[in-house]
Amino acid sequence: MLPIALSEAQVDDLFNRAAKYSPYELTADLNTCTLSDNHGLSLNFDVEPFRQNCLLHGLDDIGLTLKHDDKIASYETLARYQR
């Protein structure tokens, strides 16, 4: 989940749009860091680059760790021989 910080005015505008257009669809584009709808709305939001990369590539803590599985395996092999 990605929390997005918006101003009170922006949130009020979203509620007004949701009441005006039924059904209302809001799209969050993580590549461009933009919220948009089919009625002319376009809001930019900030995301920490590391968090953005993880979300775009589906990486959680385990996925990040497994990106280094070759180094982990090498360490485990070395540690086994040093015992």
Image (cartoon, grey):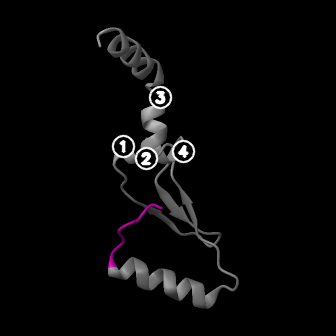
Q: Position of residue 78 (x, y in %)?
A: 35, 11
Q: Dot 2 corresponds to which residue?
A: 52
Query: Which disc number belongs to residue 58?
Result: 4
Q: Where is residue 3 in the image (x, y as percent from the top left)?
A: 40, 65
Quarter-of-image position of residue 39: bottom right
Q: Position of residue 38 (x, y in %)?
A: 65, 69
Tell me the amino acid under the disc marked 4: Gly
Label 3 Cα crowd, 10 Å radius (few <14 / some 14-19 / many 20+): few
| Between 40 and 5, the one nearer to me in the picture | 5
Look at the numbered discs 3 and 1 and tell me whether their residues touch, using CB distance below 8 Å. no
Label 4 Cα crowd, 10 Å radius (few <14 / some 14-19 / many 20+): few
**In whole angstroms, how far apart are the C-alphas of marks 3 and 1?**
18 Å
Look at the numbered discs 3 and 2 and tell me whether their residues touch, using CB distance below 8 Å. no
Tell me the amino acid under the disc marked 1: Pro
**In whole angstroms, how far apart are the C-alphas of marks 2 and 4?**
10 Å
The structure residue drawn at horizontal position 41% and vertical position 13%, both measured from the top left corner, is 77
Tell me the amino acid under the disc marked 3: Lys
Q: Dot 3 corresponds to which residue?
A: 67
Residue 78 counted in the magenta span: no
First in residue order: circle 3 vs circle 1: 1
Residue 5 counted in the magenta span: yes
Above or below for 28 versus 72: below
| Between 66 and 4, the one nearer to me in the picture | 66
First to last magenta residue range: 1-7
**In whole angstroms, how far apart are the C-alphas of marks 2 and 1?**
5 Å
**In whole angstroms, how far apart are the C-alphas of marks 3 and 2?**
17 Å
First in residue order: circle 3 vs circle 2: 2
